[in-house]
Image (cartoon, helix red, strand yellow):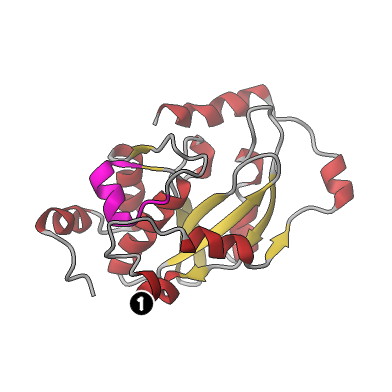
Amino acid sequence: MFDFFDARERKIFRQMDSPAKIQKFLDDEIGYNQEAGGHTCHSPRRVLREKVAHCMEGALLGALALRRLGYPPLVLDLEAVRDTDHVLAVYRVEGRWGAVAKSDYSGLRSREPVYSTIRELALSYFEHFFNPLGEKTLRAYSRPVNLARFDRKIEWMSTLGEVWEIPEYLCEIPHSSILTKSMERRLSRMDRRLYAAGRLGGVC
């Protein structure tokens, strides 16, 4: 399945032999793609060459690395208001959900596989999901999407091109709401200390 990797890519993936090491690679070796406003959707192999990724691109690389370890290549969309969505690569260990992710917000990265449901996992991001105005912006989450559905259609694992079909699909599928309208009206702004801690990720 992974015969398309060149020698350099094989060496990189051999180093990512656990979810924790996948996250460490995303944090330490991949810079944040400042074209996150929607100008790129690089494939995983392109990310390895460019050495930058925004959350969608990082999730795709994470899903590919997880697949190589025997996990299904699953991604999850977290939907926001007055903010950009965030995409995770998710996996299960002994029935519990965890995630790896790329973000320039420190609280929006990985989660240990301790969450019983996808809703629990999504809610763990709520207090860390905010916009520059300090508004808490997470509102909904998708079901996990198995990227195997795109294997033949766009060859997302092997191509060096753009893979826009994946985020377009994530935008089309149903999402489950997190808040009621009354809950939304009661939301407070971010605490300044948690805001500052979250923005520590901006240096990556």
Across and down, in percent, residue 93 comes to 44, 68
> Which span of residues is magenta-colored?
41-52
* Residue 115 in view of the camera: no
Q: Count the marks.
A: 1
Q: Nearer the viewer, residue 39 or 117?
A: 39
Q: Nearer the viewer, residue 199 or 112?
A: 199
Give me the residue at 21% from left, 70% from top.
Answer: 2
The relative height of residue 74 versus residue 41 in the rendered view (above or below) is below
- Local packing at callout 1 (Cα closer than 10 Å; few below 14, some 14-19, many 20+) is few
Say which quadrant the N terminus sits in: bottom left
Q: Nearer the viewer, residue 44 or 120?
A: 44
Give me the residue at 46% from left, 29% from top.
Answer: 202
Instruction: Tell me which amino acid carries mark 1.
Output: Arg
Residue underneath mark 1:
152
Across and down, in percent, residue 90 comes to 47, 61
* Residue 109 in view of the camera: yes
Say which quadrant the C terminus sits in: top left
Q: Is residue 27 left or right of residue 2?
A: right
Q: Is residue 48 magenta?
A: yes
